[in-house]
Image (spheres, helix red, strand yellow):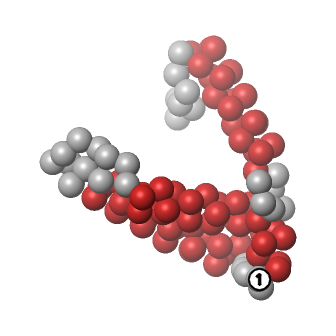
Amino acid sequence: MRDVSEFNAEHGLELSPELRMLDLSSEVGELSKEVVDAQDYGQTEFERTDDLVDEFGDVYYSLLSLAAELDIDAEAALAASLDKYQERMSASGDAGSGE
C-alpha cells in the first residue's frame, strides 16, 4: 500500500489534525449519501455503485491521513481493536462495550 504520509508530503497535503478530522467527517457524510442513494432511500435493495466505492476510498484516505497526522500506526490500532472485540465476544457473546 502506498504510504499516505509520503503521498501527502510529496503533494503538500499535510493538514492539522483538526482539519483532517473535518475532512474525514465530510467524507463520511458523502459516503453516507452514496449508501442511501444506492438503496433509493430504502425503496430498493442495496446495490454497490462506482460512486460508493469512490467515496469509500476517500474516507479511507482521510482516515489514514488523520492517523498519520496523529502519529498513529493504523494497522496496529486495528489489530488492537480486533483483539478487544474478540475478548468481548469471548466473554459476553457481544462486541459492544456494555456501556
Q: Could you tell me residue 71's position as x and y percent?
A: 83, 62
Q: Could you tell me residue 60's position as x and y percent?
A: 61, 58
> In terms of secondary structure, where does tag 1 sit?
loop
Towards the viewer: 87 or 58: 58
Q: Which quadrant: the N terminus?
A: bottom right
- 30 to the left or right of 23: left
Q: Name the residue type under label 1.
A: His
Do we see residue 46 in this rendering?
Answer: yes
- 51 to the left or right of 61: left
Q: Residue at x 84, y 70 (%)?
A: 6
User: Disc 1 marks which residue?
Assistant: 11
Q: Residue at x 56, y 15 (%)?
A: 92
Q: Residue at x 71, y 66 (%)?
A: 65
Q: Residue at x 80, y 43 (%)?
A: 76
Towards the viewer: 92 or 24: 24
Towards the viewer: 80 or 30: 30
Disc 1 crowd rating (10 Å Cα; few below 14, some 14-19, many 20+) is few
Q: Could you tell me residue 31's position as x and y percent?
A: 43, 60
Do we see residue 28 in this rendering?
Answer: no
